[in-house]
Image (cartoon, helix red, strand yellow):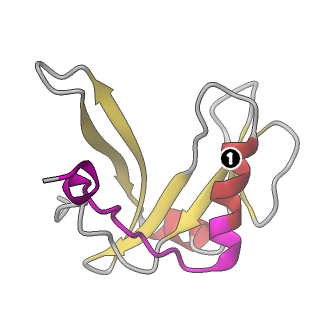
Amino acid sequence: MDEVSELRKVLPIRVSSLNDLVRIAVTYMTPVAQSVFLLKFRDRERLIVGMLGLFRDYYKLYGLPVLYYHVCNSVEEEKIVQANYIIVSSSDERLEFSKVAKPGVSIPLVELRIKPPIIPDLD
């Protein structure tokens, strides 16, 4: 079997809009060690906000994929569902939700149309 036929296919993850895709692209363009964005999606009618990561060097594996996530309460959901960014205050742990990036730390929120198959049912 040749090398090409042994390659695994990429897992397609459809986002909700072109703007969501562009926010991901912008995070990859920034000159930092690793780009960060948060995903928002529905799981059993709940709004989930999460971040995919990699727990490196897990025993003999190259890494263990992890999803750090939060199940939003009704107050958070009302704010997050319309937001494209979470703005983090540098002086305290105050969060602001915004349609546009603002000076300081603006973390893009990317909405997925559906929960991807790599994410299991969540508690």
* 12 shown above or below 95: below
Which residue is depicted at the point 31% across and 69% down? Answer: 116
Asked if the magenta segment contains residue 22, the reply would be no
Which residue is depicted at the point 19% across and 53% down? Answer: 6
Mark 1, Cα crowd under 10 Å, few <14 / some 14-19 / many 20+, is some
Which residue is depicted at the point 82% across and 36% down? Answer: 104
Residue span colored magenta: 2-21
Q: Is residue 70 among what the camera can see?
A: yes
Which residue is depicted at the point 26% across and 54% down? Answer: 7
The type of residue carrying mark 1 is Thr
Quadrant location of the C terminus in the rendered image: bottom left
Query: 87 and 91: which one is in front?
Result: 87
Query: 81 and 20: which one is in front?
Result: 20
Q: Which residue is mark 1?
A: 27
Q: Position of residue 119 (x, y in %)?
A: 25, 60
Asked if the magenta segment contains residue 3, the reply would be yes
Q: Position of residue 18 (x, y in %)?
A: 67, 77
How many numbered circles are shown? 1
Q: Position of residue 93 (x, y in %)?
A: 63, 32
Left or right for 6, reference 34: left
Left or right for 76, reference 11: right
- Tag 1 secondary structure: helix
Q: What secondary structure is the magenta-colored segment mainly?
A: loop
Left or right for 111, reference 102: left
* 10 shown above or below 112: above
Asked which quadrant contains residue 82, the reply is: bottom right
| Residue at the farthest right position | 103
